[in-house]
Amino acid sequence: MVIEQKMSIDMEVLELKNKLMLYELEIMHKDQLLSEKDGRIMDLQKAMLLLEAPKHKELPIIKKKRWWQF
């Protein structure tokens, strides 16, 4: 009876260790995904800043003279 209890406790400990390892792997994967997401957000923010950047002063429009006018 004592041996059976010890074996069942050992099995429970092993199952809990396996679950813990799986949870740690899942957390590492989620951390990696969050890091990738943050990188993409930063890229998008940089792209938006480039799109919103003030344009260089436009050159004044030069009216073309017709060839017969000097």
Image (cartoon, rainbow, N blue to C red):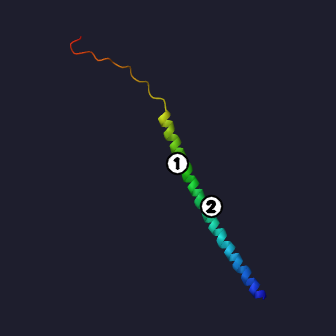
Q: Which mark is residue 27?
A: 2
Q: Position of residue 44 (x, y in %)?
A: 51, 43
Mark with earlier residue (1, 2)? 2
**Of the residues shown, which amino acid type is indicated by label 1?**
Arg
Q: Quick check: 6 left or right of 30?
A: right
- Residue 51: which disc? none
Q: Residue at x 72, y 82 (%)?
A: 8
Snapshot quadrant of residue 7: bottom right
Q: Which residue is mark 1?
A: 40
Number of other residues with Cα within 10 Å of mark 1, as a class: few under 14, some 14 to 19, many 20 or more: few
Above or below, 23 against 48 in this view is: below
The three-letter code of the residue at mark 2 reads: Ile
Q: CA distance from mark 1 to mark 2?
A: 20 Å
Q: Residue at x 56, y 56 (%)?
A: 33
Question: Horizontal and vertical percent for residue 16?
Answer: 69, 72
Q: Residue at x 24, y 15 (%)?
A: 66
